[in-house]
Image (cartoon, helix red, strand yellow):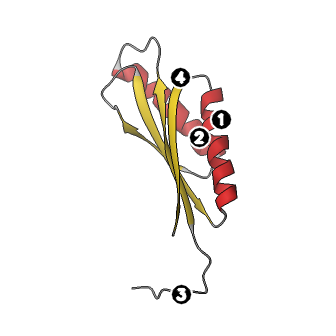
Amino acid sequence: MGKRSTDNPHMVVGYGVMIFRLHDCRSLKAKRSIVKTIIKQIRNHFNASVAEVGLNDVHQHTHIGFSMSGSDTQVIDAKMDKLINFSDDLGLAEMIGTETEILHL
């Protein structure tokens, strides 16, 4: 086990869920294609973990979760805002909600 040091800076973890409506999506195959594209674009532009985390078997809705870490709360908060705005601006699905949180470890 690693030794815990009080000299180390704290770690900040930001995470969230984006809720999307996929219009005119009539099959899970079509949904998977859109979701994979959204996830790939986010991964290509941000240093974040991203995955579909809910409503996997529903054709026209999805929850995409993400997380990122660093040492500065303001930087992580700004990056999460940019990630959400980027995802919405892709125009591949309608973002209908978001939830985010920042943890200090």
Spatial separation of the CA atoms under disc 1 and disc 4 = 12 Å
Q: Which mark is residue 42?
A: 2
Q: Which mark is residue 5?
A: 3
Looking at the rendered structure, the secondary structure element under dot 3 is: loop
Q: Position of residue 21 (x, y in %)?
A: 46, 22
Residue placed under numbered mark 1 in the picture: 86
The quadrant where residue 31 appears: top left
Residue placed most toward the observer, 38 or 4: 4
Q: Residue at x 64, y 67 (%)?
A: 71
Q: Which mark is residue 100?
A: none
Point out the frontmost of discs 3 and 4.
Answer: 3
Query: Between marks 4 and 2, how big is the CA–CA gap?
Result: 14 Å
Q: Where the N terminus falls, by quadrant?
A: bottom left
Q: Earlier in the sequence, mark 3 or mark 2?
A: 3
The furthest residue to the left: 57
CB-based contact (under 8 Å), mark 2 and mark 1: yes
Chain-order first, disc 2 or disc 1: 2
- What amino acid is found at the position of numbered circle 2 in the picture? Ile
> Mark on residue 93?
4
Kind of residue indicated by mark 4: Ala
State which tag comes first along the sequence, 3 or 4.
Answer: 3
**Callout 3, which amino acid?**
Ser
Please say if 88 is above or below 12: above
Q: Which x, y percent locates residue 38? A: 54, 32
Within-10-Å neighbours for mark 1: few <14, some 14–19, many 20+? some
Q: How many marks?
A: 4
- Dot 4 falls on a residue whose secondary structure is loop
